[in-house]
């Protein structure tokens, strides 16, 4: 039996964050804790939008690095190149950091403690169900090149 030429991830990361966000909003509406949904103050809005903007910029720069390298961004598709430029010089997972920053910013804008709390299990699922399988795949696919990259660049920050 051959192994597939892609990372077998448990869930696509954007869907994971959207599911956590949706569940957090539902819990905020039906079992509220904290100030309630969409009741931000000026500072909360400003800080939240800064995190959202930072996450979006990081995501765009990361996707551009994939496109420049000529490889696929979406988990579940074969990697044709090891991306080590752009934000990937600083962290091995800048897209996921970007998603987490956007999510955190949304939790502030939405003033939802549930949304914020659900970031923790979302990140745990991301680590076990996405990042670790991706790393195993990249190590199989790119061997020593990936091991050297992994030794030099941290998984997160």
Image (spheres, rainbow, N blue to C red):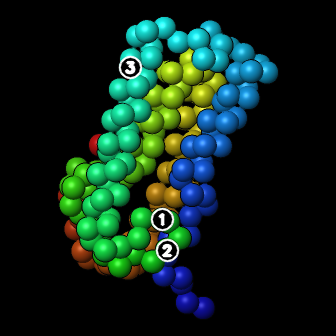
Q: Which residue is mark 2?
A: 77
Q: Can residue 107 be spotted in the picture? A: yes
Quarter where residue 73 is shown? bottom left
> Is 68 on the left-hand or right-hand side of 39?
left
Residue at image location 61% in from the left, 60% down from the top: 10
Which class describes the residues within 10 Å of circle 2: few (<14), some (14-19), or many (20+)? some
Q: Which residue is mark 1?
A: 74
Residue at image location 40% in from the left, 10% down from the top: 43
Along the line of sight, which residue is nearer the eye, 88 or 148? 88
Q: Is residue 128 above or below residue 120?
A: below
Along the line of sight, which residue is nearer the eye, 156 or 94? 94
Where residue 34 sits: x, y (%)?
63, 11
Which class describes the residues within 10 Å of circle 1: few (<14), some (14-19), or many (20+)? few
Q: Is residue 53 above or below residue 35?
A: below
The C terminus: image quadrant: top left
Q: Are marks 2 and 1 in contact (CB under 8 Å)?
A: yes
Dot label at residue 58: none
Along the line of sight, which residue is nearer the eye, 87 or 125? 87
Residue at image location 36% in from the left, 34% down from the top: 53
Residue at image location 22% in from the left, 68% down from the top: 148
């Amino acid at each position: 039996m051959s192994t597939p030429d892609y990372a077998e991830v448990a869930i696509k990361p954007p869907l994971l964050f959207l599911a956590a966000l949706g569940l957090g909003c539902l819990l905020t509406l039906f079992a509220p804790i904290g100030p309630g949904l969409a009741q931000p103050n000026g500072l909360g809005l400003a800080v939240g939008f800064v995190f959202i903007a930072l996450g979006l910029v990081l995501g765009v720069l990361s996707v551009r690095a994939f496109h420049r390298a000529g490889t696929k961004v979406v988990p579940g598709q074969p990697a044709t190149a090891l991306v080590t430029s752009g934000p990937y010089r600083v962290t091995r997972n800048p897209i996921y950091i970007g998603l987490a920053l956007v999510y955190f910013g949304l939790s502030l804008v939405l003033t939802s403690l549930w949304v914020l709390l659900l970031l923790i299990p979302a990140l745990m699922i991301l680590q076990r169900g996405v990042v670790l399988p991706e790393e195993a795949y990249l190590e199989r696919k790119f061997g020593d090149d990936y091991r050297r990259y992994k030794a030099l660049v941290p998984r997160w920050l």
